[in-house]
Amino acid sequence: MSGTHPAHRGSIALEDAEVLDQQGWPGGQYVLRLRAPRCAARAEPGSFVHLSCASELPMRRPLSIQRADAAAGTIEILYKVVGHGLARLAAAQPGERLSCLGPIGRGFVADPARPRALLVGGGVGMPPMVFLASALAARAAEGFRPLGLFGSEIPFPFRARPSTILVPGIPDGTIASHPLLEELGVPSRLASLAGFPGCFAGYVTDLAAAWLGSLAPPALAEVAVYACGPTPMLAACARVAARFGVPCQVSLEEFMACAVGGCAGCAVEVRTAAGRAMKRVCVDGPVFDAAAVFPPAA
């Protein structure tokens, strides 16, 4: 979160991570906690691990880090079961060891000149936003004031609670919050079309637009948006940020084989100063400038 990143290949560790515990949630969602001290020591908001799901499965899965505790040597991952590999991971028991490669990727770079950080997470794109909220809360002395907005169309993988933190500009009745952010003293709100109590009835990007639209120009000039979630959500977030003239960073979700830049299977087209280029999500990202990935319509 310093704004600089270490030489990438030198920052990746391979270690046998110990399963400490995991908790299941509706919708096939799981929160997994691992003892992985080398990864925990270097993890940044936006970085991920390439994790083996079981010793008998050769292919790893890229999973975002939700929390990292360098002192305890632990990392936490939120994932949703999709396919055989993650179904096997969901069956992992405490004491089991999994090969863990990480942390991988270039994370979010917070701008102190824009301390109003709007964090937008959708589905399994929520973990990097939780990690970023924690990092920015630790930098409150620099003026950072994060606000987390989270969206899901299946039950949230946590027990939502009514927020005790007032957020001007949030539509009336939108009071459900993420407990991990609430514990940090960081305001948050939830959005869903599924009719969950206390949630904004709409897409999380619509909630973001409502809040941004409530700000006066001087306040808007202090905002930067950070987002992770499904590609359609990120594209919508990029459009919202462009409409309000605020910068936006997005963390992309792509299928990966090697996750260390060798296979280029996760390459996406990005606009650069030199023109269009193919960038690898694993090591050139996963975080990119939103306008470079989702350029505004001409």
Image: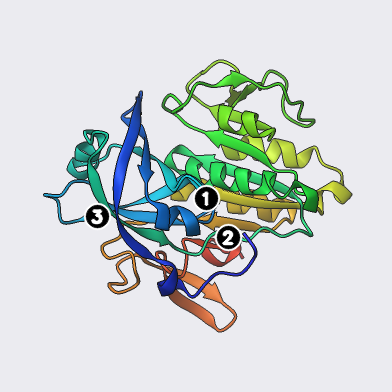
Residue lying furthest left in this view?
56
Residue 119, position in %: x, y?
62, 44
Which percent across, then down, holds residue 160?
54, 22
In which quadrant of the rendered image does the N terminus lie? bottom right
State left or right for residue 83 relative to residue 214.
left
- The x, y position of residue 261, in whole percent, is 35, 72
Can residue 114 be seen here?
yes
Q: Do the residues labelled 1 and 3 touch (CB within 8 Å)?
A: no
Would you place residue 26 above or below residue 209 in this image? above
> Can residue 297 be seen in the rendering of this structure?
no
Residue type, numbered disc 2? Ala
Q: Badge 1, how many Cα within 10 Å: few under 14, some, many 20+?
A: many
Q: Nearer the viewer, residue 121 or 290?
A: 121
Residue 149 placement: quadrant: top right
Q: How far apart are marks 3 and 2 (CA)?
A: 27 Å
Tell me the residue that label 3 is attached to.
60
Q: SS of the residue at dot 1?
A: helix
Indicate which disc, 1 or 3, sits on the residue closer to the N terminus: 3
Callout 3: helix, strand or loop?
strand
Q: Do the residues labelled 2 and 1 touch (CB within 8 Å)?
A: yes
The residue at which mark 2 appears reads as 290
Residue 137 position, x and y percent, is 68, 44
Query: Residue 269's image quarter?
Result: bottom left
Spatial separation of the CA atoms under disc 1 and disc 3? 25 Å
For marks 2 and 1 on the same chain, the one whose residue lies earlier in the sequence: 1
**What type is the residue that disc 1 sits on?**
Leu
Front-most of residues 89 and 280: 89
Q: Residue at x 79, y 49 (%)?
A: 141
Q: Which mark is residue 63?
A: none
- Numbered mark located on residue 234 in the image: 1
Q: Going from the N terminus, do you reach mark 3 or mark 2 first?
A: 3
